Amino acid sequence: IGAAIASLASYILEFYLFSREAKSMHLPSNYSILLKFLILGIFFAITIYLLKAIINANPYVEMIIVLSISTILYIYLVIKSKALSSEEISIFKELFRKLFNS
């Protein structure tokens, strides 16, 4: 839970700092993508919290189950919300292929 809350706080801080710097540099900013990731981060934290309350098992087994389900759900929602372009998704696929094939 602490890591999810820390991630949420860092996303909020990142959003604020990015907005301030983008304005000073006169860069166009895409707030919708940042907002999508912020909402998805909040949803991720809530999912972890709820699954942790539901699942009662050995702490290590519980951690693996909760994080696996939460991560799969998060990735699914990122793809469904089109927060990442197909090009960015293919970059991640290639990265994972290289990572797990070596």
Image: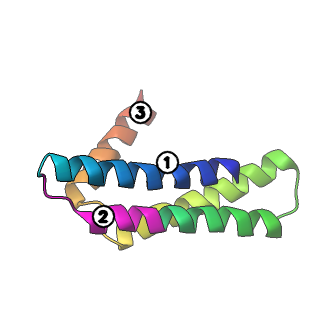
**For residue 93, above or below residue 76:** above
- The amino acid marked with disc number 3 is Leu
Q: Position of residue 14 (x, y in %)?
A: 40, 49
Graded by Cα atoms within 10 Å as few (under 14), some (14 to 19) or many (20 or more), the crowding at tag 1 reads: few
Q: Position of residue 42 (x, y in %)?
A: 55, 65
Majority secondary structure in the magenta region: helix
- Nearest-to-viewer mark from 3 and 2: 2
**What's the magenta region?**
27-39
- Queried whether the magenta region covers residue 32, the answer comes back as yes
**Residue 76 appears left or right of 70:** left
Q: Residue furthest bottom?
A: 80
Labels 3 & 1 near each other (Cβ < 8 A): no
Residue linked to disc 3: 99
Residue linked to disc 1: 10
Mark 2 element type:
helix
Q: Is residue 52 visible?
A: yes
From mark 3 to mark 2, how far is it between C-alphas? 27 Å
From mark 3 to mark 1, how far is it between C-alphas? 27 Å
